[in-house]
Amino acid sequence: MALLIRGPRSGDGEALASLWRELWDAHERWGGYPGTQDDAAYQAVAQRLEDDIYWRQGASTSGRHLHLVAEDRGEVVGQVEGWMDRYGVLLSTLDTCEVRSLIVRHDARGTGAGQALLGELGRAAFEWSRRRGVVLAAEVLERNPASAFYDRVGYEALTWSLRVDLPVSVRLDSRFRARQAHPRDAFDLARLDGLLAERRRTMRDTRYDPPRSVDAAHVESIAAYLEQPSPGATDIVVIGERSRVCASATVSVSFLEAPFLPQRRATLSRFAFDPELDIDVLMAALVKGAGDRALALAAGTLELVDLSAPGTPLHRATSTIGGREWSRVFARVIRAAS
C-alpha cells in the first residue's frame, strides 16, 4: 500500500461523498440518526465538497475546519474532518479538535489508513493551536466497533451519553420543579458551575477551565448571558423548597441536515447538582423539563451527554429514568506535532 495523507483536491468530491454515504449507512445500522438514500442528496454533497475544495486550494486547514484525505495509488480510500474549538477562557485551557466523519473505505480497512489519518489530524490540530497541547476528541456510538480502534491507538473513554425517548415518563417529587433560568439565578449558577468544573477535573477532562471562585465578574457574565440567551440553547434549573436553585443543565435543539434525514436533535448537558440533595430526584426534574421543551420543538429523543462513567451516581441516575446507552467520547492529548 502506497498511502498518502493530504488535503482534499479538485475531483475528490464524488469519492468523498461516497465515503460519507458509507459512514451514514453504518451509523444507521448502529442505531444512529438515519441518513437519506436519495442519490441526488449525495450528488449535492459532492458538489458542496468540490466548492469547499476550490476555496481551500489544496490546504488541509480552512479557518477552524480541518480536512484530510487518505489516498492509495491514486484512489481516495479514507478521510477525516476536525473542528477546532475552545471550551474555556483561561490561557492554560487547551484547544479541542473534534474528530468528525472518520471513515476508511470498507476494502481498505486494516491497512493503517485510519491511524494515519488520525495522526496527521493531530499534527494539523497542534499546528493550528500553537499552544502547549491540543485535545483530540471523538464521539463514538456504543454499537460502533470503532471503540476498539480508538482504544488501540491510545485514546481513552472520557465521557458517556445516554438517550431517552420523548415524551419522558418519570416520577417527580412535588417539592422540586424545573424552569428556564433567569438572570436572577446567576449567583446560584456560578456556584453550580464550580461543581461542574470539579466533576470534569475528576474525570480528567481537560477541555474545560478548572474550578474558579465565585466572584462578581463571573456572576455578572452569567446574568448578561441569560438576558440574551443563545437561540439554540436554553439553561434550565431545578427549584426546591424556599425557591432554592438545586440543579442546572443546558438543553440544546438543532436541525440535522442532509445527508441526514430532516429531523431535530436534542441534547441535555452541563449537569450540576447540589451535593446535599438526592441526585435521582434532581435528574428526574431536569430531564422532564428539558424533555418537554425538546418535544415542543419537534424532537423525538433527548441525549443526556457529558456524563461520568458507568457505576457513578450521575450515570446511575440517568439509567434510573430510562436512559439507554448511546455513545461515549474518546480523547487524547497531543503534546507535540511529531
Image (tube, rainbow, N blue to C red):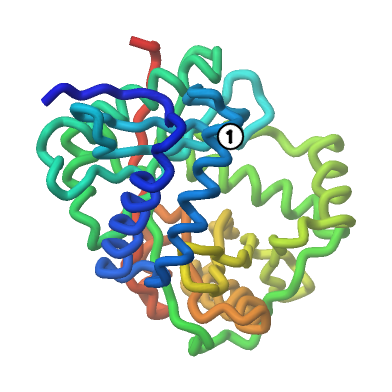
Residue 212 spot, x, y in % from top left: 66, 33
As displayed, is residue 177 above or below residue 187?
below
Q: Secondary structure at mark 1?
A: strand
Q: Residue at x 31, y 70 (%)?
A: 31
Image height of 134 relative to 69, above or below: above
Q: Residue at x 37, y 38 (%)?
A: 80
On screen, residue 276 versus residue 91, left or right, reads: left
Q: Residue type at mark 1: give it.
A: Asp
User: Is residue 295 visible in the rendered structure shown here?
Assistant: yes
- x, y percent for residue 235: 71, 62
Q: Which residue shows up at 49% across the image and 23% down it? A: 58
Q: Viewed as shown, does residue 82 lie left or right of 266? A: left
**Front residue of this view, candidates 29 and 13:** 13
Q: Is residue 301 left or right of residue 316?
A: right
Q: Quadrant of residue 2?
A: top left
> Which quadrant would the N terminus be assigned to in this image?
top left
Q: Residue at x 35, y 32 (%)?
A: 69
Residue found at the very far front of the displayed protein: 11
Quick check: can you spot residue 317?
A: no
Q: Nearer the viewer, residue 157 or 130?
A: 130
* Image quadrant in which you'd find residue 188: bottom right
Q: Nearer the viewer, residue 142 or 5?
A: 5
Q: Residues within 10 Å of mark 1 (few under 14, many from 20)?
A: some
Q: Which residue is mark 1?
A: 85
Q: Considering the image in quadrants, where does the C terminus appear?
A: top left
Percent across and percent down for residue 207 are: 51, 34
